[in-house]
Amino acid sequence: MRVGVVGVGHVGLPTAAVLAHIGHEVVAMDSDTSKIAALKDGVMPFFEEGMAELVATGIDAGRLSFTDSAEVTVSGAVAAFLCVGTPPKSSGEANLLAVERAAEEIVKVATGDLVLVEKSTVPAGTAQQLTVALRRHRTKHRFWVVSNPEFLQEGRAIEDSLRPHRVLVGSGSPEALAIMEEIYRPIIEQGAQWIATDVATAELAKHASNAFLSMKISFSNALARLCELSGADVIEVVRAMGSDPRIGTEFLNAGIGYGGYCFPKDLTAFERLADRFGYDFGLLREVKKINDEAVEAVFKKIEDVMWNLQEKRIALLGLSFKPGTDDTRLSPALRLAEMLLEHGAQVVGYDPKANANAQREVPGLEVADDVYGALQEARCAVICTEWPEFAELDLGKAADAMAFPIVIDGRNLMDPDAMDEAGFTYIPTGRPPRGVGPHPD
Ligand SMILES: NC(=O)c1ccc[n+]([C@@H]2O[C@H](COP(=O)([O-])OP(=O)(O)OC[C@H]3O[C@@H](n4cnc5c(N)ncnc54)[C@H](O)[C@@H]3O)[C@@H](O)[C@H]2O)c1
């Protein structure tokens, strides 16, 4: 089938590559013409494991192409996937201007009946509003706005798009649902659950999922604070809790908090949506508050071990908001970097993929070419992102490089016994610290 994809960001590009991989003829466009030009030259706009290869295969097979023209994107297409950004307004509500603009541009030049697929995360009611707005254009052809929320996780976007747990589509039109089911058939046949529902339910399910996942993380972070106060070990507590299948252990890792382009903005947008309907969803505010406190707790630990922060060199290991991506949008590591810089510390970071993005966002941040370079002469190191290479550090070499071998583990990545044996003062999250306190001499 011929499909168009609008927006080649973290959702649009994997979507386009995967739709081409499963046999469709895909044309992808973006209003950022530099991204399109780079993609035509085989340069990816961001890092995602396996994406460059899948994009290249799609292009070579003649099933994937890039354009900056709406006409080319939609010519002969049965569906157009809207994957544009929905950033927060200052009120916290989702800004839907890009969705409206992209949809207008596409629908005006459609060459036949078209399914407009809302893949961007939007508040419940958006498809209905968009339909009303688009009808004003008195288009020649019929169109249906369907909701098809995206659940991929950055860092595993290709795998998640190829083998999602579910394909959720909301629409009141059996015709549109049939087209969507046909597009996704190869993925459904491989085991993804096909969930067809009404459009508002699909839209709301996406916000509800992200809010629930954020809540799980904040629950663990609140638990971590209590463990630190009571001497318990949050990892053991979660293991004990998670043995109950009603709870499970997934997504209950205590740490420096969640970040990225989705959870923070979606949580607030969901709360604003509830407000609009007159429901005070106070739980969501508490989730955000605990998340803010998670990074503040790490800052406090640094202050506790460092005393004065001015001019002290502090290393941040990991700058992206999660491993497997170079995305630093709302990364807790960068929030911590800013707090440390404001207090006069000298902050040096290292990330396997995100150094350039981090430095662009926080110009005062120094970046090192490798992890040992970041640790060199540092008085304290903080693990902010759980990249596997940090778990495999040569601990002797790391301790030798540092001015003082002090590690604050914001992701509970390291083995406390190994850190203790290597002579580190080791301060994890929600677990008993090692090597802290006055020495006997
Ligand atoms: N990043 C994720 O992990 C993720 C996961 C699930 C859902 N989402 C949702 O998907 C949507 C997109 O997120 P993203 O991370 O891919 O954003 P992004 O910023 O990486 O990409 C958005 C792209 O849309 C382009 N764009 C904006 N307006 C356009 C227009 N009128 N026409 C054509 N292109 C236009 C931008 O240039 C950009 O390349 C958001 O609603 C987000 O909440 C994101």
Image (cartoon, rainbow, N blue to C red):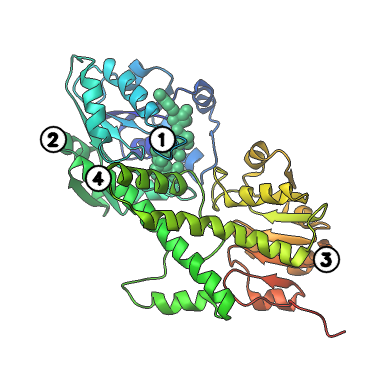
Determine whether 336 is above or below 147 in the image.
Answer: below
Q: Which residue is mark 3?
A: 400
Q: Amino acid at mark 2?
A: Ser
Q: Which residue is mark 1?
A: 86
The residue sitting at 63% across, 73% down in the picture is 415
Determine whether 224 is above or below 174 in the image.
Answer: below
Mark 4–mark 3 CB contact (< 8 Å): no
Q: Amino acid at mark 3?
A: Asp
**Which mark's residue is nearer the viewer, 4 or 2?**
4
Which mark sits nearer the N-terminus, 3 or 2? Answer: 2
Whether residue 3 can be seen here: yes
For mark 2, give the secondary structure.
loop
For mark 4, give the secondary structure.
helix
User: In which quadrant of the rendered view does residue 183 lie?
Assistant: top left
Which mark sits nearer the N-terminus, 1 or 3? Answer: 1
Q: Is residue 188 left or right of residue 84?
A: left
The residue sitting at 46% across, 61% down in the picture is 217
User: Residue 360's x, y, as percent?
Assistant: 66, 36
Is the C-beta of the residue carrying label 3 under 8 Å from the nearest atom of ligand 1? no
Q: Amino acid at mark 1?
A: Thr
Q: Residue furthest left?
A: 174
Is the C-beta of the residue carrying label 2 under 8 Å from the nearest atom of ligand 1? no
Q: Which residue is mark 4?
A: 202
Mark 4–mark 2 CB contact (< 8 Å): no
Q: Residue furthest right?
A: 441
The residue sitting at 42% across, 70% down in the picture is 249
Q: Label 4, label 1: how many angstroms apart (C-alpha)?
A: 17 Å
Rendered-image quadrant of the C terminus: bottom right
